[in-house]
Amino acid sequence: IDPDRCTGCRLCAIKCPQEAVSGEKKAPHRIDQEKCIKCGICYEACKFEAVVVR
């Protein structure tokens, strides 16, 4: 997640089926790569294009 674009809205964290996204409200979030199944739900949910796919 690009910290310069992430507003901490928590939408990606709420949508993640693996609970792989963490972070405080209104602060940049992080994706736990150990938990992430690369489903793309967080990418689709983010209105700020902060989720970076590599």
Image (cartoon, rainbow, N blue to C red):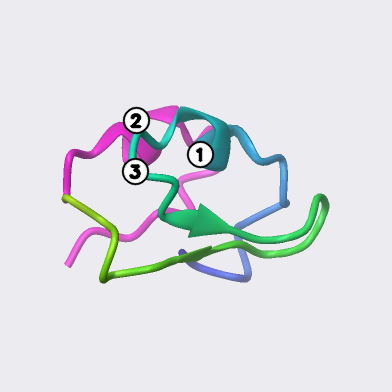
Residue 22, x across and y down, in percent: 58, 59
Q: Which residue is mark 1?
A: 12
Placement of the C terminus among the 4 image quadrants: bottom left
* Element on which disc 3 rests: loop
What span is colored magenta in the figure? Answer: 38-54
Lower position in the chain sequence, tag 3 or tag 1: 1
Residue 12, x across and y down, in percent: 50, 39
Residue 32, above or below 11: below
Q: Is residue 6 magenta?
A: no
Which numbered disc covers residue 44? 2
Q: Residues within 10 Å of mark 1 (few under 14, many from 20)?
A: many
Q: Which residue is mark 3?
A: 18
Residue at image coords 67%, 61%: 23
In this rendering, would 43 be left or right of 30? left
Q: Amino acid at mark 3?
A: Gln
Q: Amino acid at mark 2?
A: Glu
Residue 31, x across and y down, in percent: 42, 64
